[in-house]
Amino acid sequence: MKRGVLVLGHGSKLPYNREVVESVCSMLRQMRDDIMVVPAFMELCEPTIEDGLEELAKSGVSEVAVVPLFLAHGVHTLKDIPARLGLEDGKRECTYECGGVQLRIYYADPLGPAEAIARLVYERALEALGE
Amino acid sequence: MKRGVLVLGHGSKLPYNREVVESVCSMLRQMRDDIMVVPAFMELCEPTIEDGLEELAKSGVSEVAVVPLFLAHGVHTLKDIPARLGLEDGKRECTYECGGVQLRIYYADPLGPAEAIARLVYERALEALGE
């Protein structure tokens, strides 16, 4: 059973959100080459969520972890994105029909309050203070 | 010279953005107890940016790293927040007047495309896939 990860960014008119999403995808591909990794954006950028899922389906993927590349849950991750995936309220799994292919979707949590995030904030603070 | 960090979240009607910002503040305080750490929010939550800077100024802080707790630069980090801080276009430092106290502000970068972010995405993907 071929598996994939959709790394789902917010999207932006500026290029920086795309850069983070695409860099994260490259890093994930280096961590693990048996899982297909595809970027997508909720709004303002392409590929869209639907484009990304179609790419995975066309490549023979049947199980996809959709990971919202957001720091925390919010209206986007709890309402907007689940609606696009066809997830019922509060559910984490669904089947997504895509050009005759059925993708099994597993909806992941956003990054959350991790120690690694605090360490990055600390680095950014020290850089700014010139320490 | 007493220094501080303002950890600046987007803000949200839901509680999750606040949870991440406050957790990151707690973790930073454990990393380093000689720098005062204060949370703030760009919108929808309090303390506001102005509230946070006032708290730092009242505590005798004179140099502040303002770290936007955002994944990437975008309109918020490049336009909206600098305008609130009184930063001139493209500048990273300014003096912020606050109740007769002058705070020297050093504006930091957001998290950016770090390896640590990719590892968190990978963890979230595997959790969702039940691996």
Image (tube, coloured by chain):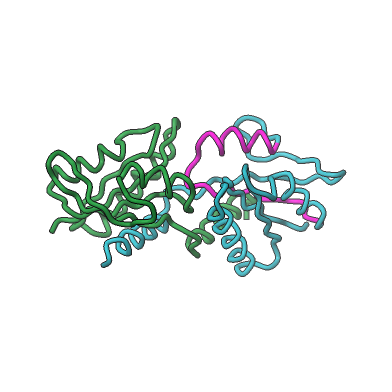
Chain colours: A cyan, B green
Please tell me which residue lies in front, B81 or B131: B81
Dividing the picture into quadrants, the one containing residue B91 is bottom left
Please tell me which residue lies in front, B58 or B116: B58
Q: Is residue B101 above or below residue A117?
A: above
Residue shown at 27%/59% (left/top)? B31
Q: Where is residue A128 in the image (x, y as percent from the top left)?
A: 31, 61
Horizontal side of B34 relative to A122 (left or right) equals: left
| Residue A64 part of the magenta segment | yes
Horizontal side of A111 relative to A91 (left or right) equals: left
Residue shown at 58%/55% (left/top)? A18
Please tell me which residue lies in front, B107 or B125: B107
The total number of labels drawn is 0
Q: Position of residue A100 (x, y in %)?
A: 87, 44
**Magenta range:** A60-85
Residue shown at 53%/33% (left/top)? A75
Q: Which residue lies furthest to the right in this view?
A: A100
Q: Is residue A78 above or below residue B106?
A: above
Q: Position of residue B4 (x, y in %)?
A: 22, 53
Please tell me which residue lies in front, B120 or B48: B48
Q: Residue furthest front?
A: B89
Q: Where is residue B130 in the image (x, y as percent from the top left)?
A: 63, 51
| Residue A73 part of the magenta segment | yes
Quarter of the rendering occupied by the N terminus of chain A: bottom right
Dividing the picture into quadrants, the one containing residue B9 is top left
